[in-house]
Amino acid sequence: MAHKLGGDGFNLLVDGNKRVITFDSLKRNSALLGLHDLRDEDMLSMLKEGDLDDDGALNQMEFCVLMFRLSPKLMEESYPCLDEALEHEFQHQRSISL
């Protein structure tokens, strides 16, 4: 799903006035992305699964977390970046303490 949405997925699904993804904005805009097979129950489930602050909508951070959780390949591809970031931080902390 994350590959289908691409990097602009949040912006394509967001409610322009509220700047979050709501059930209505998801329902209205998902067909534009070729996700017309989603049933109301699927959309509600997706919103509930990603809604970390329990406000009934997805902000950009919640959307990104949900896309990573729904796309294991993205997680696998992100491990080298995480390793590199951790190594950089370790080196930085080490140079500060010297």
Image (cartoon, grey):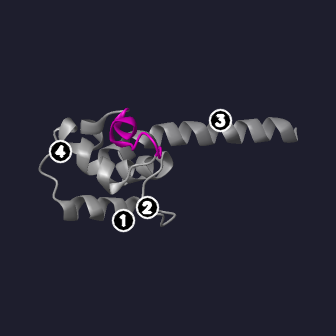
SS of the residue under disc 3: helix
Task: Name the side, left or right, on which 22 lies relative to 59.
Answer: left
Spatial CA span between label 4 and label 1: 18 Å
> Disc 1 marks which residue?
48
Q: Earlier in the sequence, mark 2 or mark 3?
A: 2
Dot 4 or dot 2: first in sequence order is 4
Q: Spatial distance from mark 4 to mark 2, Cα to Cα?
A: 20 Å
The residue indicated by pointer 2 is 51
Tell me if label 2 and label 3 are in contact, CB under 8 Å. no
Tag 1–tag 2 contact (CB < 8 Å): yes
Q: x, y (%) of residue 75? A: 38, 47
Is residue 54 inside the magenta stretch?
no
Residue ranking furthest to the front: 17
Above or below, 36 relative to 5: below
Residue 71 visible in the snapshot: no
Labels 4 and 1: the sequence-earlier one: 4
- Hey, what amino acid is under mark 4? Leu
